[in-house]
Amino acid sequence: MTCNFFNEFEIVKNLETKIIGKKNIYIFQETDSTNIQAFNLALSGVEEGSIIIAESQTSGKGRLGRNWVSPSGKNLYLSIILRPKILTLHAPRLTLVTAVALSETLDDFKIFDHRIKWPNDILLNGRKLSGILTEMKGDCDTIDFIIIGVGVNLNSSSNDYHDDIRDSIISLKEFTNTEINRIEFLQSLLVNFERNYFDFIQRGFDEILSKWIKKSSIINQKIKVTEHENIFTGIVIEVTSDGNLIVQAGTEIHTVNSGDINYI
Ligand code: BTN
């Protein structure tokens, strides 16, 4: 019998990875943010492949300075420490590597009806199931370390969220009507992440990008782009090798590399 609380013994048991989750595993009942903890651990020299998990976060960090609501004992809040020897300008590619790994994990759970939403969300029924926050330390040339932060709503219910965001969020349990084994989900994610990470490091980004484009169904999609005060609509005609969107808005072509999009 397996226990559905995070514990190191259950996580490493039968975990088919080489390094990811095979180094140090730090489990917090409660912490500010697993990304903050991971950053500090990486600063102190903790090795690549180490993972940090929390049952709850008091200051979970989302993209663009947002908060990541982190109800206790229900979801997955994970950070992975990486020390890849890649160019600093290619670091954002790891967000797409992670999105592909999340998507393949959902496939493992027979949830085929999901979609990657640029740049890093996974949507189910148009609602947000998971998000990724990639942070790094380095200079223009060299990466010291990268923290991949992943939040996945596994067993939360709509009561766990405030009214203003409730309708935009979904959990896997709500979608499937079944309690999700968080350890099994984590193990599958670590395996899928490691395979895609190694592919990226060893063979380059092309294959990952094609998988990402396929799983996002974004080509020819009409979108509304919000980049700070700049808001416009257009059609996605291409995704660049850095994961930026090329959007045709009337006669103008825009490159979108930050901000948010909405499907129209
Ligand atoms: C987003 O805004 O979509 C990104 C959300 C990322 C949330 C995860 S939860 C685990 C890790 N720790 C954090 O503080 N944030 C990330």
Image (spheres, rainbow, N blue to C red):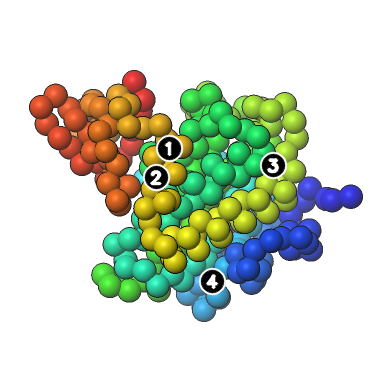
- Residue located 32% across and 68% down the image: 87
The answer to whether residue 135 is left or right of residue 30 is left
Rendered location of residue 92, percent (x, y):
36, 55
Q: Amino acid at mark 4?
A: Glu
Residue type highlighted by circle 2: Ser
Are circles 2 and 4 on residues that touch, CB within 8 Å?
no
Q: Amino acid at mark 1?
A: Lys
Give the secondary structure at mark 3.
loop
Position in image of residue 29 (x %, y %): 70, 56
- The label shown at residue 74 is 3
Whether 224 is drawn above or below 210: the answer is: above
Identify the disc placed on residue 210: 2
- Which residue is disc 4 drawn over? 48
Q: Alpha-carbon distance for marks 1 and 4?
A: 29 Å
Give the CA separation, mark 3 to mark 2: 33 Å
Q: In this rendering, does residue 36 appear at all?
A: no
Residue that carries the numbered disc 1 in the rendered image? 214
Earlier sequence position, callout 3 versus callout 4: 4
Q: Is residue 25 left or right of residue 240?
A: right
Q: Residue at x 65, y 42 (%)?
A: 108
